[in-house]
């Protein structure tokens, strides 16, 4: 596993090189797409990207947890969590590795 992280700048640079938009326009495009995705998720909508996967928000109810060190019961508040479910194509691609 590498420690490389794909950043917003990497995405905008790839758009600049492959699509031909200016660096500024490429950066604005990346920001706009991420903002639309964020807004949809905050509103409780799913974000489905074909051949990639689906982002969705789950409501988790309150429950009682346990501190593993002391065994003490601790209440866990209800919360919303972001989930990602990869598509079958993405799962297959990741499983085959970089040479696949």
Image (spheres, helix red, strand yellow):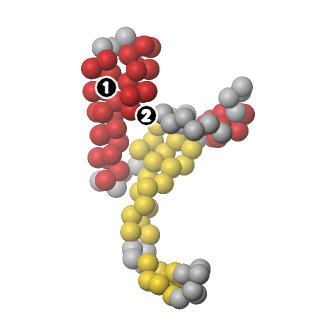
Residue at left 27%, top 20%?
24
Residue 96, image quadrant: top right
Q: Which mark is residue 27?
A: 1
Disc with the residue nearer the chain's start (2 vs 1): 2
Q: Secondary structure at mark 2?
A: loop
Count of numbered tags: 2
For label 2, the crowd category at 10 Å Cα-Cα, with few meaning under 14, some 14 to 19 and many 20 or more, is: few
Q: Residue at x 39, y 77 (%)?
A: 77
Which percent across, then down, holds residue 44? Answer: 34, 55
With 21 as the anchor, is 94 left or right in this view?
right
Identify the residue under disc 2.
Answer: 7
| The N terminus, quarter of image | top right
- Horizontally, residue 4 falls left or right of residue 97, namely left
Residue displayed at 45% across by 41% down: 48
Quadrant position of the C terminus in the picture? top right
In front of the other: label 2 or label 1? 2
Label 1 sits on a secondary structure element that is: helix
How much space separates mark 2 and mark 1, taking CA atoms? 11 Å
Find residue 15 and report its horizontal and vertical position in percent. Answer: 40, 19
State yes or no: discs 2 and 1 in contact (Cβ < 8 Å). no
Residue for point 30% across, 33% down = 31
* Residue 73 position (above or below residue 11): below
Q: Position of residue 80 (x, y in %)?
A: 39, 64
């Amino acid at each position: 596993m590498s420690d490389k992280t794909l950043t917003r700048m990497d995405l905008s640079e790839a758009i600049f090189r492959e699509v031909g938009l200016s660096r500024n326009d490429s950066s604005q495009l990346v920001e706009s797409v991420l903002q639309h995705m964020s807004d949809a998720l905050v509103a409780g909508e799913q974000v489905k990207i074909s051949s990639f996967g689906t982002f969705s928000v789950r409501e988790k109810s309150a429950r009682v947890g346990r501190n593993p060190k002391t065994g003490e019961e601790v209440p866990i508040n209800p919360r919303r969590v972001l989930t990602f479910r990869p598509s079958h194509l993405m799962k297959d691609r990741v499983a085959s590795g970089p040479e696949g």
